[in-house]
Amino acid sequence: MTQQHHPQIKICGLTDPEQALECAQLGADAIGLVFYPKSPRNVTVEQAAAITARLPGHVASIGVFVNPDRETLLQTMEASGLSAAQLHGQESALWVDALPSAIRSSVIKALFAERAPKLTDAGSYDVKAYLVECGKGRLPGGNAMAWDWAIAEEFAQHYPLILAGGLGPENVAAAISTCLPDAVDASSSLESGPGLKDMAKVKRFIEQVRQTASLYNSRKRETTPVLSFPNAPGGHHAQSDHH
């Protein structure tokens, strides 16, 4: 198998099936669907199902939830055909650790530099990967705020890392160079309006991420396929082409 030497790419906050498909065609490894009514990127189960139905089999669909009710999450995962769940609230470690067996798939947990749960809480959870961002702003996500990504450098040496928060075409290469994450996640920085992507920005973002391969090669850093879910039930799930 060929080892991938640049981070995997997740484009989050999709609301349109055709834009999700275009993200996949441009090279995204995963797309994120937000199930949080306060977010302008919130989608219904019906919208989510329409989006996942358009994705090619190698592209994962990840549901983003904030302090969800367990039954609602389980029903949403199944009805939407999602590959994995991303938990973006203050879910307890006990609650989180019991989830993978219930959804028969993987869980990603968000941690924050500025608020709880913090990066130092990583050892408390048993999850596939951690999405790390600053944690400032009105909404639970990155709020398009850039931050000191170098804070995540040591974290990346010990835990599977998805770097997020204010990433766009103009800064993603610099952000990657600070901590060499396994994956990167972008949302509002790639938008033309809430929930609508500027596909030219998405294209440039993906191109910039791919150009960081030389950094990983020179530092002999191999990435973990944190956005690949070969055993996810139903729906579309990414097959790893490395490791």
Image (tube, helix red, strand yellow):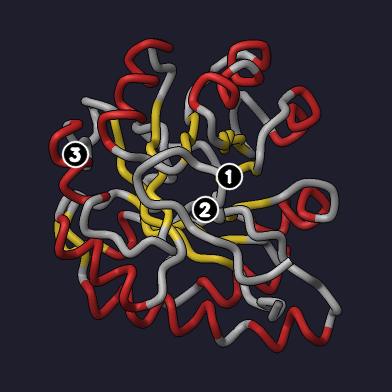
Q: Which residue has dot 3 on it?
A: 40
Image quarter for residue 192?
bottom left
Q: Amino acid at mark 1?
A: Leu
Residue drawn where x is 56% and y is 34% of the image: 107
Q: Amino acid at mark 2?
A: Ala
- Residue 91 is situated, as x and y percent measured from the top left of the image, at 55, 17
Q: Residue at x 59, y 22 (%)?
A: 101
Disc 2 on helix, strand or loop? Answer: loop
Q: Secondary structure at mark 1?
A: strand
Q: CA distance from mark 2 to mark 3?
A: 18 Å
Q: Residue at x 57, y 87 (%)?
A: 211
Q: Residues within 10 Å of mark 2 (few under 14, many from 20)?
A: many
Q: Which residue is mark 1?
A: 131
> Given contact means CB atoms under 8 Å apart, are the residues at marks 2 and 1 in contact?
yes
Other-residue count near label 3 (Cα within 10 Å), few / some / many at <14 / 14–19 / ≥20: some
The quarter holding residue 34 reads top left
In the rendered view, tell whether residue 241 sits above or below residue 141.
Answer: below
CA distance separating discs 2 and 1: 7 Å
Q: Position of residue 234 (x, y in %)?
A: 38, 41
Ranked by sequence position, the earlier of labels 1 and 3 is: 3
Q: CA distance from mark 1 to mark 3?
A: 20 Å
Viewer-side residue, 58 vs 63: 58
Of callouts 2 and 1, which one flags the residue occurring earlier in the amino acid sequence? 1
61 vs 93: above or below: below
Q: Quadrant of residue 45?
A: top left
Three-letter code, disc 3: Pro
In this figure, which residue is indicated by the disc labeled 2? 164
